Amino acid sequence: MPAFDNDEIFAMNRAPETIEQVREEMRQIRSNLDDEVASFKQSTRVLFDWRSYVRRAPWLCLGAAALAAYLVVPSKPKVVSPTPEQLAELAKHSRVTFAESGPQAKAKSVGRELAGVALGMLVRAGLAVATQQFNQFINRPPGPTEPSGAGGPKR
């Protein structure tokens, strides 16, 4: 028969209580988990809601938007108009090509402008749809999104 010291005998006698304690702790953790997940979702929803930032600090948001617009909008290009003497000097030292001018060049630029306007409208419409979908995703209520009826229970 093996020899046991007092600590091992005490541990053997305490084992059922310890297992029950562990089970009880696991039950408590499971019951608290739903509340914690709901709280986490709510805090995340508030964190990503841009309207709450505008409500709390409207001037700061306005300044951030102005800074973003300033950084995004390209600066006006500088137009250099060389003198005829400078053009002649450039022509002597390197190859100089001139862009087309006239009705054909204008037709190309009008077509490009129309394409640019159409592209801008498409981008705006796409952003509006994406923003709407994102807001619906963020603001949807927690829980199952499909009814559990006709298709049977989900696995």
Image: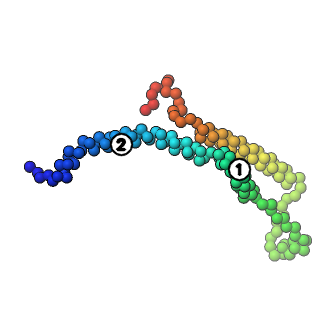
Q: Disc 2 marks which residue?
A: 25
- Outermost residue toward the left in this view: 1
- SS assignment at label 1: helix
Say what amino acid the circle numbered 2 marks: Glu
Give x and y (percent) for residue 110.
83, 49
Give x and y (percent) for residue 28.
39, 40
Answer few, some or many: residues within 10 Å of disc 1's Cα (few below 14, many 20 plus, some between 14 and 19). few
Say what amino acid the circle numbered 1 marks: Pro
The disc label shown at residue 58, or none: 1
Q: Is residue 129 left or right of residue 114?
A: left
Q: Is residue 79 above or below residue 59?
A: below
Q: Is residue 10 left or right of residue 59?
A: left
- SS assignment at label 2: helix
Q: Residue sitting at 17 percent across and 52 percent down?
A: 6
Q: Earlier in the sequence, mark 2 or mark 1?
A: 2
Give x and y (percent) for residue 117.
78, 47
Q: Residue sitting at 79 percent across and 50 percent down?
A: 112
Q: Is residue 27 left or right of residue 97?
A: left
Q: Residue sitting at 85 percent across and 67 percent down?
A: 80
Answer whether residue 104 is visible to the viewer in this image. Answer: no
Count numbered badges in the picture. Answer: 2
Give x and y (percent) for residue 59.
72, 52
The disc label shown at residue 47, or none: none
Q: Is residue 123 above or below residue 150?
A: below
Q: Nearer the viewer, residue 79 or 58?
A: 58
Q: Residue sitting at 83 percent across and 52 percent down?
A: 109
Quarter of the figure with residue 63: bottom right
Quarter of the figure with residue 69: bottom right
Quarter of the figure with residue 155: top left
